Image (tube, helix red, strand yellow):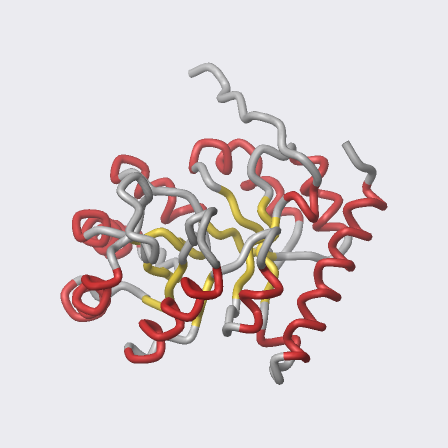
Amino acid sequence: MGSEVDIAENLAAVKARIAAAAQAAGRPAAAVSLVAVSKAHPAPRIGAALRAGHRIFGENRVQEAEAKWPDLKQAFAGTRLHLIGPLQRNKVRRAVSLFDVIETVDRPNLARSLAIEMEKSGCRPDCLIQVNTGEEPRKAGVLPAAADAFIASCRDEYGLPLKGLMCIPPINEEASLHFALLGEIAGRNGLEELSMGMSADYQKAVRFGATLVRVGTAVFGERQPFIAASA
């Protein structure tokens, strides 16, 4: 595992590459935010990124985030935590209370549960809809053909604080095609946030309009498997 200095240097390098990609695309660097993916990394390593000044992080699992983030968020003001993994309905209450952004809204019953919990709790994390741009059977996300109707439902029926879209392109296909498709769906629905691009392709995603890029390994190094604490 790398040192605190390594993590600070990694952050600076990734942000420099984001800025260069934005400049090449005629966009301001400030238009793109780095979501540092901290899943499977322990609190001390996350703390190194926080001490380096970074404030936007992504986690895949509610349970893992609960074990690490309440104390970190209290210690570092202005931190924003994104849920970037699938959300089960039985974890909606916990997700709404902990996360500032939920990027993986992908089905009506989840949208309904989120709306009910937000009304009940008064917490209203920003929401992004996950689009399965590759139409992969085992991947979460609304299909592109159903995206417009689902976006309308999230806004009009459920009243979610909907900000944009997220996608994870198939690993064996050209990512730019999927980034372009996500941008088209967002554009015709008036959505500004585009969460797309990971360690292997985030610079390309910036050229296609990403406003959020999700990068973990390039910041924190290789991950270790998360082991849940005993109940």
Position of residue 40 in the picture relative to residue 100 (left or right) = right
Q: Taking 109 as reference, is 187 above or below it?
A: below
**Quarter of the image where one finds residue 183:** bottom left
- In the rendered view, tell whether residue 209 sits above or below residue 173: below
Tell me if I can see residue 130 in this picture: no
Residue toward you, 125 or 225: 225
Residue furthest out toward the right: 5
Residue 191 in view = yes
Q: Which quadrant of the structure image shows residue 29?
A: bottom right
Rendered image quadrant of residue 124: bottom left
Residue 186 lies, in percent from the top left, at 35, 73
Instruction: Name the outermost residue toward the left.
Output: 157
Question: Farthest top residue?
Answer: 230
Quarter in which the C terminus is drawn: top left
Residue 130, percent across and down? 34, 56
Give the percent coordinates (x, y) of residue 84. 45, 48
Q: Name the residue rendered at 67%, 35% in the picture.
A: 222
Position of 91 with respect to 212 (left or right) is left
* View extreme (bottom): residue: 26
Residue 32: percent from the left, percent from the top? 58, 70
- Residue pictured at 30% horizontal, 39% vertical: 138
Q: Nearest the camera: 49 or 137?
A: 137
Q: Camera-side residue: 60 or 18? A: 18
176 lies above or below 10: below
